[in-house]
Image: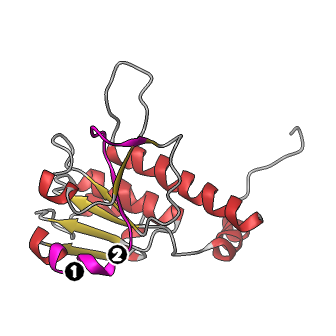
């Protein structure tokens, strides 16, 4: 590592362009409230190659400058749609497998789950989680085991863990 250097500028841009894929699960945010979290979610969604983001019953102003700043302009590359829960229910059949990223009585640990069939992932409200009506639309729930004293982590951080593990599982499948 003594002679190793960080990749920057055009070299980094060209490398990322070769890797660009938009096949990771669509992200559905149920009742998201803060533009800061949306900005972080968009940045993670872009980095992991998500198909897009749907905001369910969210009042976030998509023109809020915090979103663009925190997303590092990913908001210009990741499709965003705002829907009511009813609109989403009416279009539920567009998705083969919807997973919830939530601790529930029946959720499976991320370490034990295989979820390559997931084409949409639901995240919950910052403090109340995923509504029961939305959770009922999911095929399964996955949780991240917590080894500290807190029972949860920021949703954008949890999303990053999930999407990169999804990407890892996809790469392992493609190597076979």
- Of residue 4 and residue 95, the one placed in the foreground of this image is 95
In this rendering, position of residue 86 left or right of residue 28: left
**Looking at the figure, which quarter contains the C terminus?**
bottom right
Measured in 3D between alpha carbons, the distance from the residue under mark 1 to the one under mark 2, in whole angstroms, is 8 Å
Residue at screen point 62% across, 57% down: 169
Number of the label disc, if any, that sits on residue 2: none
Q: Residue furthest right?
A: 3
Q: Position of residue 82 (x, y in %)?
A: 19, 73
Q: Residue 60 is drawn in which quadrant?
A: bottom left
Q: Position of residue 15 (x, y in %)?
A: 71, 70
The residue to which callout 1 is attached is 91
| Crowd class of label 2 (few under 14; some 14 to 19; many from 20; radius 10 Å) | few
Is 91 inside the magenta-drawn segment? Answer: yes
- Of residue 2 and residue 126, the one placed in the foreground of this image is 126
In this rendering, position of residue 135 left or right of residue 99: left
**Looking at the figure, which quarter contains the N terminus?**
top right
From what the image shows, is residue 14 above or below residue 160?
A: below
Is 101 inside the magenta-drawn segment? Answer: yes
Residue at screen point 36% across, 70% down: 75
From what the image shows, is residue 93 above or below residue 68?
A: below
- Of residue 136 and residue 67, the one placed in the foreground of this image is 136
Residue at screen point 20% across, 50% down: 130
Tag 1 and tag 2, C-beta contact below 8 Å: no
Specify start and end residues of the magenta stretch as a single range: 89-108
Q: Circle 1 sits in a helix, a strand or a loop, which is it?
A: loop
The residue to which callout 2 is attached is 95
Q: Position of residue 152 (x, y in %)?
A: 32, 33
| Crowd class of label 1 (few under 14; some 14 to 19; many from 20; radius 10 Å) | few
- Of residue 44 and residue 10, the one placed in the foreground of this image is 44
Q: Circle 2 sits in a helix, a strand or a loop, which is it?
A: loop
């Amino acid at each position: 590592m003594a002679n190793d250097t960080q990749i920057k500028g055009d070299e980094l841009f060209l490398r990322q362009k070769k890797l660009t894929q938009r096949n990771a699960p669509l992200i559905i945010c149920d009742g998201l409230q803060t533009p800061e979290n949306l900005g972080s979610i968009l940045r993670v969604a872009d980095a992991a190659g998500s198909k897009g983001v749907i905001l369910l019953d969210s009042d976030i102003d998509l023109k809020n400058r915090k979103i663009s700043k925190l997303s590092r302009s990913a908001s210009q590359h990741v499709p965003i749609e705002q829907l009511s829960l009813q609109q989403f229910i009416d279009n539920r059949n567009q998705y083969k497998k919807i997973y919830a990223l939530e601790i529930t009585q029946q959720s499976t640990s991320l370490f034990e789950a295989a979820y390559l069939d997931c084409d949409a992932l639901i995240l919950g409200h910052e403090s109340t989680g995923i509504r029961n009506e939305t959770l009922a639309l999911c095929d399964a729930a996955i949780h991240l085991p917590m080894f500290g004293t807190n029972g949860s982590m920021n949703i954008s951080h949890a999303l990053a863990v999930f999407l990169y593990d999804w990407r890892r599982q996809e790469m392992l499948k493609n190597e076979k």
